[in-house]
Amino acid sequence: MTYCVAMRLTDGLVFASDSRTNAGVDHIATFKKLHVFQREGERVLVIQSAGNLATTQSIISLLTTRIQSQHTPNLLTVETLYDAAALVGETVREVIHRDSASQQNSSNLFGCNLLIGGQIGNEPPRLFHIYPEGNFIESTNDTPYFQIGESKYGKPIIDRVLTVDTPLEHAMCCALISIDSTLRSNLSVGMPLDVMIYRANSFDTREQRRITENDAYFMGIRKAWSEGLLNTFRQLPPFPPES
């Protein structure tokens, strides 16, 4: 399984993904789930993936290969982020149909969810959630973030903290605490983490990094959040007896 979160905010976009795809007694696999497509000075697209690994790898491979084609629409030639989301959705349907064609009623076994966000030209940064059926929805000011994978453990912190006007650095801190909460509750989500901040109109992808268990910042906020929760809990009044 996996956990990815993406946020579309006033100042830009925030992306954070874990890298675990399988977890068991004797089998743990790590694969990157955050993929960047860029044309310098003109567009930046980020795709995050969750679900069947064979499906998501095929989708990313096709999208990457088709960039080399001069005759096929691709992520570096589409005119808007909406068009990019539609193109990815078509690729999702293509791969799932191909891989599930020989197995009756099993397309759900090949399913995946994707997030695509970024900026093309003069349009503002945008963010979409693409479903296994290939259809998609766009983030709004009322819903400025999407999660895919094991989302339930990390959702409460985001709902309590995040607004569309949250500064990007604070939003990344929120995303990392959200992932840490998931790490503590679900073994199918694991380190390292791949994260990226994209600042609106910068077309710059340099604010990417891989966070490991020994990352000083991550260790610091993990400890501070845990101790803060515990201290707050201790200050709460105990449950009163019946009068």
Image (cartoon, rainbow, N blue to C red):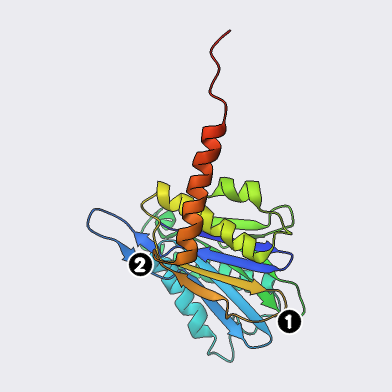
Q: Amino acid at mark 2?
A: Thr
Residue 36's x, y, as percent? 54, 77
Q: Give left or right: position of 136 versus 219.
A: right
Could you tell me which residue is drawn at 50 percent across and 82 percent down?
64
Seen from the viewer's position, the closer of residues 96 and 187 is 187
205 relative position to 223: left or right: right
The CA span between labels 2 and 1 is 34 Å
Q: Is residue 94 visible?
A: yes
Within 10 Å of disc 1 (Cα), the crowding (few <14, some 14-19, many 20+) is: some
Q: Farthest residue in the left direction?
A: 26
Residue with the mark numbered 2 = 30
State which quarter of the image contains the N terminus: bottom left
As drawn, the label of residue 173 is none
Q: Residue 9's spot in the image, x, y percent? A: 70, 63
**In the rendered image of this protein, does residue 87 appear above or below residue 176?**
below
Label 2 or label 1, whichever comes before in sequence order: 2
Look at the numbered disc 1 and give the secondary structure of its residue.
loop
